[in-house]
């Protein structure tokens, strides 16, 4: 009986396993916008192996900020302007996103989902370093 | 994008929405994707949609893991695409109406003809398409383990909401 309760507890725990805590977790990779874009333009397949599903931190320049259905989206650009990095922010980042301006340098932490002519990022937050300097 | 394929009158979104919904007696499963890429050629009615399977966000982390690793095998088939036509788009003389869309859905390495009715809204600098259709899990060679067979519906409802802007 005890065994059943224990195993049931583990099953329920596993079933409700939370998503990775973006804020508290350390990024597995730290890159600049240009570096990740270069990797994707060189070879999408190996770039996917390197980045997809990993928590990564990207430093880059803001090309655009938009809001859609309560979600803020920050686009980071590269020098050539062909591809960009589209970052869908977590709702908790919204207030900080309002303080940002086009053209400024920021650091974003989030999960890469792949490449659709742009690099797609989900569940992103702004790292603290963006606001310490002010 | 394939620039020869599309004329000057292209409309595009990179923030389109597609979700799927599975209803069973055991549980309801829903996943949302807000990173859908869709291009419409207003002149020819051509439409091309692409999405990343990994961009589907689930309520539970475990569901998302199983979906990507075991069911749709995202590492092997990272994208789903739809290529087709919006029929009679040129003849449409109202702002709001319904259109028929026909094309091929590619997912998990399998292709399937899809035909559906969608709501269309044509504004000065926007074309909105929304609607839903059903797909059979079995059509895409997706294997569901027996243990969870009762948790996942055989027919999945796909909902789309795509707001295209002129492509410059």
Image: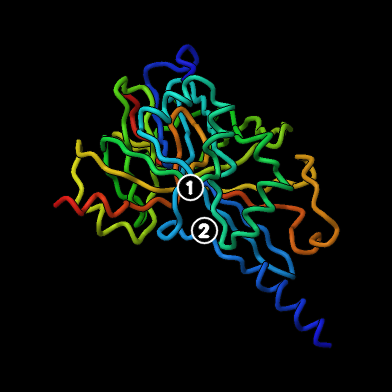
Rounded to the nearest angstrom, the CA distance separating label 2 from label 1 is: 9 Å
Q: Nearest the camera: B140 or B113?
A: B140
In the shown orientation, is residue A58 left or right of residue B109?
left
First of labels 2, 1 by sequence position: 2
From the image, tell me which residue sits under label 2: A20
Q: Is B76 positioned to the left or the right of A35 in the image?
A: right
Residue B100 in percent (x, y) is at 57, 36
Per the image, label 1 sits on a secondary structure element best described as strand
Dot 2 alpha-carbon crowd within 10 angstroms: few under 14, some 14 to 19, many 20 or more:
few
Per the image, the residue denoted by label 1 is: A55
Q: Secondary structure at mark 2?
A: loop
Q: Is residue B42 above or below residue B123?
A: above
- Residue B41, percent across and down? 45, 24
Contact between marks 2 and 1 (CB within 8 A): the answer is: yes
Report whether residue B54 is seen: yes
The answer to whether one can see residue B161 in this image is no
Q: Residue at x 24, y 49 (%)?
A: A130
């Amino acid at each position: 009986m005890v065994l059943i309760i224990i195993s049931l507890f583990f099953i329920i725990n596993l079933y409700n396993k939370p998503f990775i805590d973006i804020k508290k977790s350390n990024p597995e990779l730290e890159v600049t916008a240009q570096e990740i874009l270069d990797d994707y333009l060189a070879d999408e397949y190996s770039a996917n192996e390197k980045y997809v599903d990993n928590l990564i931190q990207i430093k880059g320049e803001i090309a655009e900020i938009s809001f859609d259905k309560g979600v803020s989206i920050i686009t980071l650009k590269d020098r050539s302007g062909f591809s960009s990095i589209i970052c869908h922010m977590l709702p908790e980042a919204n207030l900080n996103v309002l303080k940002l301006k086009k053209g400024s340098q920021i650091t974003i932490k989030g999960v890469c989902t792949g490449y659709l002519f742009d690099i797609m990022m989900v569940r992103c937050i702004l790292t603290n370093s963006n606001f310490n300097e002010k | 994008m394939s620039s020869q394929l599309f004329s000057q009158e292209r409309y595009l979104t990179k923030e389109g929405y597609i979700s799927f919904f599975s209803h069973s007696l055991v549980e309801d499963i829903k996943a949302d994707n807000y990173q859908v890429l869709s291009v419409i050629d207003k002149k020819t009615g051509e439409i091309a949609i692409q999405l990343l399977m990994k961009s589907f966000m689930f309520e539970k982390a475990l569901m998302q893991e199983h979906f990507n690793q075991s069911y749709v095998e995202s590492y092997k088939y990272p994208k789903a695409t739809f290529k087709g036509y919006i029929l009679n788009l040129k003849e449409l003389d109202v702002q709001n109406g319904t259109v028929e869309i026909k094309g091929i859905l590619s997912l998990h390495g399998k292709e399937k003809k899809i035909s559906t009715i969608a709501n269309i809204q044509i504004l000065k600098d926007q074309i909105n398409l929304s609607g839903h259709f059903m797909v059979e899990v079995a059509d895409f060679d997706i294997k569901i383990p027996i243990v969870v067979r009762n948790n996942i519906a055989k027919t999945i409802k796909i909902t789309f909401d795509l707001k295209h802007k002129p492509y410059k």
